[in-house]
Image (cartoon, rainbow, N blue to C red):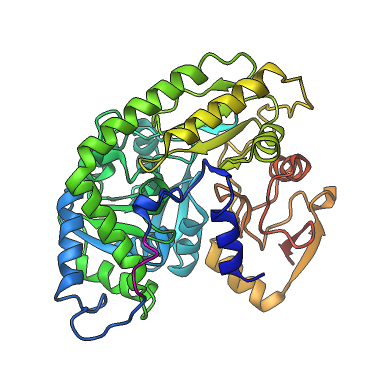
Amino acid sequence: MDILDKLEQYCNSDYVPMHMPGGKRNPEYSSTSILDITEIDGFDNMHNPEGIIKNAFERAARLYGADETLFLVNGSTSGILAAICGAVRKHDKVAVARNCHVSVYNALLLAELEPVYIIPDIDHKTGIYKGITYEDVKKCVHENTDIKAVIITSPTYEGIVSETRHIAEYLHSKGIILIVDEAHGAHFKFNSEFPESAVDAGADLVINSIHKTLPALTQTALLHISKKNVDVDRVERYWNIYQTTSPSYILMASIDRCIGIIEENGKELFEKYICSLKLLRQKLGQLNNISLLDSDDISKIILLCDNGKILYDRLLNEFRIQPEMASFKYVICMTSVADKQEYYDRLLQALEYIDSTWESHDVVTLDKNIYINNAPDMRMTPSQAMELMNEQGCDEIDVCDDSIYGRVSASTVLIYPPGMPVINIGEVITQKAAYTIRNAIRTGLEVPGLKEGRIQCLR
């Protein structure tokens, strides 16, 4: 069975898509009828836009209130790489929120940057990272006066936002650039029930994955640029580098059509969506054994329980509802303006039944020894570690072998989703990090970065 056959089989099934992309298999937002073409006469060129693509860029910038907006057809990852590499110089020091996506860590490697980490607080009952505060950033800058940029993720996968406006104001007073990975907040701009968008809050570079929460195809995203503090030409140069030279017109058309839908009908669509969403959340709040997290972003349905993987599996296998992801103690169901009322009705009915039949399970103990809530022991920058690995090679040690403690990692090991490193290349592997990875494996979560259960370590 090829990819197309598999996609068609899934789309013709009755699975409830409580996950991204935001189009949610709703024919009203389908882009499948758009022809796949290349840069033929009259269709402009994304890398040298002068016509319809330039107009589409400007249309998106107006909608989001940005000085300039660029389409991303290689996903938010390409925008994060372009923003970081374009905003700073090689070997610069940058402050990075430790809960950033792996693409941020890849940018550190590519640009050979020296990171210092801002460690967000953790809710130890759920394992969910809290937002980055103004005081967190101020303390970091005070201790590292040579920082050139600060990189944060807001909102998080769970819809938790940081104090972006206060952080931006403070950093600008110090001449420091603020880059916000707002991949999961592309919808913030369009209703006051959502948090303030990072563009409105004054961030210099903002990346939105519109496919995550808006009706657009997977891999579509936006890079917003403020011209006050950023070298726009340099950012655009890196944007060109990290975009394919054969950009998909289907993806670009999907972005443009999404922008058009919001321009023309966004107010009505989002008001209807918010009404349905609030009613769903009100009813979910009445469950007894499964509780609803009061997230900053109400579009994220965060279901707390004593074993997230079991809840995830029951929704999928018993009720044909596909959640977005499971973690140790919670499940995420993502909503969007493209949802049908049928989806909410089925989700509610399933959860009411599961809640009424829920029994205590093997509880994953969440204490301070499981989650990484302190600064990592970084023995060298990621680029230095990569160079050393190329020169001297590495050893592969089983993650369950206690001899791994104290070794320097040559791997970036994640729990996915959301894709935040538990241990990054160049860092000492602590007992705490190994314990987190072991618990993720035992719970049945996906852990990229391991090779058959082994971590690569520098010699």
Using the rendered view, name the quadrant where residue 359 is placed: top right
Q: Is residue 116 above or below residue 341?
A: below
The magenta span reads 31-35
Front-most of 110 and 89?
A: 110
Q: Is residue 103 above or below residue 189?
A: below
| 323 drawn magenta | no
Residue at position x 39%, y 45% from top?
Answer: 213
Residue at position x 25%, y 60% from top?
Answer: 256
Q: Is residue 275 above or below residue 139?
A: above
In this rendering, does residue 392 appear at all? yes
Using the rendered view, name the quadrant where residue 296 is placed: top left
Front-most of 348 and 367?
A: 348
In this rendering, does residue 173 appear at all? no
Q: Is residue 304 left or right of residue 431?
A: left
> Residue 28, position in %: x, y?
35, 50
Residue at position x 35%, y 58% from top?
Answer: 221
> Residue 11, position in %: x, y?
54, 55
> Residue 295, position in %: x, y?
44, 27
> Residue 330, position in %: x, y?
61, 31
Quarter placement of the N terminus: bottom right
Quarter placement of the C terminus: bottom right
Using the rendered view, name the quadrant where residue 332 is placed: top right
User: Magenta region, mostly helix, strand or loop?
Assistant: loop
Q: Is residue 457 left or right of residue 287?
A: right
Residue at position x 58%, y 45% from top?
Answer: 14
